[in-house]
Every structure is written in C-alpha cells, then in structure tokens.
Amino acid sequence: MEAVIECKGLTHFYGKRKIYENLNFQVPRGRILGLLGKNGTGKTTTINILSGFLAPKQGECLVFGENIREMKPATRARIGLLIEGHVQYPFMTISQIERFYAAFYPKWRRDAYYALMSKLRTSPRQRIANMSCGQRSQVALGLILAQDPELLVLDDFSLGLDPGYRRLFVDYLREYAKAEGKTVFLTSHIIQDMERLVDDCIIMDYGKILLQCPVSEILEGFRLYRCQWEGLGESEAVVSALEPFHELFHPSLSRRTLEFGSFAREETVQRILQDCHIEYSGLQASRVSLEDAFISMTGKY
Amino acid sequence: MFKAIFFKEWLKTRWCLLAALILCSGFSAYVVARVFKAVELQGAGHIWEVVAGRDAIFVEPLTFVPLLVGIVLGLFQYFPEMQRKCFKLTLHLPFSSLRMFFCMLSYGIAALSLCFLPGLLLLGTGLREVFPSEFVSRIILSALPWYLAAYAAYSFVAWITLEPTWKFRAFAMVLAFFCLKIFFLAPAPEAYNAFLPFLALLGFSLFSLSWLSVLRFKAGKQD
C-alpha cells in the first residue's frame, strides 16, 4: 500500500537529551494510525517534525513524497493539522474563522464546518477565546473537515476534553475518515479513545519504536500472563532471569504473583519458565484491552 | 488570500489602531492648540523669534508617542500569534511563509502610516496658520526621526515577539534599546536632516531580522 507519510532515520536531541535515534515508520494511505507512548517518549516531537515545525538532527520525513522541510503550499493544503490543545485563533469568532480559512482552501466545504457547529450551543458570533475546550475542539475539527485534506495530523486530540466531547470527536472523525478514505496520523494520551478510533498503532518507548501493527493484532494476539511463584530465594532473581527473553514484556513480581505480557503462545511461555527453572503454579493467560497491553509493553514507570 | 490575511491582522489590531489614531491625532491637536495659545498670549512676532533664534519646535510632547504606538501595535499584532503557538496555524496555511510574513509586516507598516498621517496633516496645516512653510518643515523634519523610530520599534517588537528562545529575545531587547536610542540622541532641531535617509534605511532593514525569528520558529528552536 502506498505510504502517505514516510519517516526515515529520524534522530532528535533536545540539548544532550536523546529523544530517539534512527526512527523509521510509514503511514499507509487510508489508514488511521495512532502513535502511543508515555510522556516524554517523543510523540509531540514526531508531530512537530511531521508538521514542519521542528528540524530533526538527522533523517527526513516525506509526506506525499515531498520532504516536509521544503514542502510547497499546495502540499500543505492536503494536510489538516490539529495542534495540541485544539489551538485556534482566539480573537476570531465562529463565523470569522470560517471566512478566514475559506480563502486559502480551494476545496473548502462550508457545510461540513457548519454541520459540526450546529451541534454546539453557541452563536456564530461567539469568540473562540470564550469557548470551553470541548467547544474549541469542535471548531478545530470542523475547520479541518472543511479543508477536506487527504491527510489529518492530530496532536493529542483528547487533551482537555470531557468524555462526551471525546466520544463526539472520535466517532465523528472515524466516520469521516472511513467514509472519505482519509489517512489519519494522531496521538492521544487516552488509549481507550485510540482503541475505538485507530486501525494501526505505533507504540513508542524511550528512544525507540517497540511495535507497529494493526490494533486488531494486539487485541487478538497479546496476552497478560499471571501465575503464582512457588520458589524460594530472592524475588529479584526471578525477574532478572526472565528479562533476557524479549518476547516477555516487563516481567514483575508482587506478593508472589508473577506478571508479564507477551504475544507468545502459552506453550512457549511455559517453556521459558521451565528453562529459567522458575517454580510456578496456576498460569493464566488473559486477553487485554489496548490500554493494558500498552502498559504491559511499556511498563508502569 | 491577501484580503483574508489583512482581515486577520485587522481583527487583532482594530482597537489598538483606533486608540493609536486618537492618541496621535490628539497629541498633534494639543501641540497645535499650544502654539495657537502662545501666539494669542505673546504675539506671532515673539513666537517666530523664539523659533528662529532659540531653536524652539513646540512638538516635544510628541517625542515618544510614535515610539509607543509602534511598540503597542507590534505587540497587538504578533503577541496573539505566539499565544499557545497560534503562529503554527498561520505558517501551516497553504501560502508561502515568506509572502505571508511580508503581508503581515506590510499591514503593520501601512497601519502605522495611517495612524501617523492624520496627526502629521493636522500638525502641518495647523502650524501653517501661524508659521511660514520654512518653519513648518523645520518642525516636521525635527519630529521625523521620532516617527521613523516607531517603524524601527515595530520591527524590533516583531523580531522579539516571534523569536522562540528567551536567550535570543534578551539579546534582541538589548540591541533594540541601543538602536532605538539613536533616534533620540540629538535634541537640536533638524539635527538629523543629513542622517534621515540612513535612519529610514536602518528602520526598514530591521524588518529582515524578524524573518530570522520566523525561520528559527520553523526550525523548532527552543531554550
């Protein structure tokens, strides 16, 4: 499938602090891809690089085959950008901002904007500065939908939204993207929203990508394993023994309950536990939500 | 598109422009009224003598008014762009960033000129009632560096406000302080006459510095 976004060998530092090194990923056309990561793993940095507001130390980002650093205005018209916090010009009203943006986009869809605005209990003369974060999110989304972009880049779209507005945003966006075949690249710190919205996800840990795959693969294939440790001796030794096995994510032992996540089948896990001479009982594998899988893969701390 | 850009700038600055227009025209009216009153009390002959012999120009109350207008207009125009990084929205629009920024600066220059024009016209026509044209041009030329300082201050505010790092902002502020002092160094009338083209050039060349801030903003520079 054709890649709308292609990031090759991205490396970035803030001062001496490495954010990531040699990051490579692609976003295929027509897919909704969510970038998941704990705070400080470089989600916003990636969005900033992708939207042309940060020059990476190394590597390049191609959007529609064009290097983002030298992007032509016509290519920018194909990208709808949502800035973290649903930022929009606070000094404009609902109708003024629509008039302003309409002048720049040849395919402007006024109806799409006002269809969303009609769901808000606001007047067209209300200033954006006086709106709640939820209302502002709808204005920002309405403006992006009216631009009719081929690619939507959304930075932490759930920030500051109450559950109702989050649901409205997610449902409206998913319906729109699927109906119109749009490509979406987004981040959010609320992973339940991602589960409802995205097709594929990239899970980032500090400095690297842990995983890029369809969400369905995680939901179907990832298991949270729990068992009782029956052995004697140091509990740290049990965790240390399992750490070299990369197919087991973040093993932890608490009050004799051994816990870790893995894509591996139960037989494989049993074999690993036996190879490590770990005495255990009652091994249970359970399916988990995307959020639990994410925490299991990246650790609680 | 140009209309839309000017519309956005107008929304940000309309109340500031109205206040600036009233302030500039008000101060000019005050200066003219002061001259009229002096003529009425002491006679035109005496006032002419004061202008010719003692280098009086009567427009001192105006000294820092254009500077203030330049600074405040710059703040009203560029500060909202940097609030929560709205400037990203502006730069993401499908329009050349350089042309976008040029339009924003052009709006500022035009707005400043429109603020100053009625006041200067009022000053010119008012003073022509009392003084010969040589005296009027002497007074206007003496005040001209203050107006040029307004354009320089405006471009410094654009540079400083759009600059993404505090370190560079502090450097630009220090530079702005010393650079703007040049416009207020000589108290004698027409002291800057030979120097005016250079001052104008300095004021307008400063506009390119603010483009540096835009480039640094786009490169994601931060403290």
Image (tube, coloured by chain):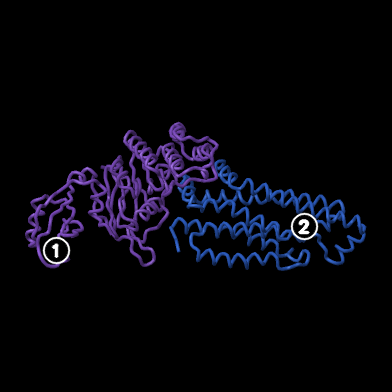
Chain colours: A purple, B blue
Structural crowding at the residue carrying mark 2, measured as other residues with C-alpha within 10 Å and reported as few (<14), some (14–19) or many (≥20): some
Q: Which circle marks residue B140 in the picture?
A: 2
Residue sitting at x 78%, y 49%: B122
Residue lying farthest front? Answer: A255
> Which is nearer the eye, A62 or A168?
A168
> Which is nearer the eye, A196 or B137?
A196
Q: Please, what secondary structure does the residue beneath circle 1 have?
A: helix
Q: Nearer the viewer, mark 1 or mark 2?
A: 1
Q: Position of residue A208 (x, y in %)?
A: 27, 58
Q: Which circle marks residue A73 in the picture?
A: none
What residue would you read off at disc 1?
Answer: A238
- Label 1–label 2 contact, CB within 8 A: no
Residue sitting at x 47%, y 43%: A132
Q: In which quarter of the image is residue B202?
A: bottom right
Q: Position of residue A23 (x, y in %)?
A: 29, 56
Q: In this view, does A279 lie to the left or right of B14?
A: left
Structural crowding at the residue carrying mark 1, measured as other residues with C-alpha within 10 Å and reported as few (<14), some (14–19) or many (≥20): many
From what the image shows, is residue A132 above or below residue A117?
Answer: below
Identified by mark 2, the residue type is Ile
Q: Can residue B212 be seen in this view?
A: no
Q: Is residue A168 visible?
A: yes
Identified by mark 1, the residue type is Val
Q: Tell which subunit mark 1 falls on.
A: A
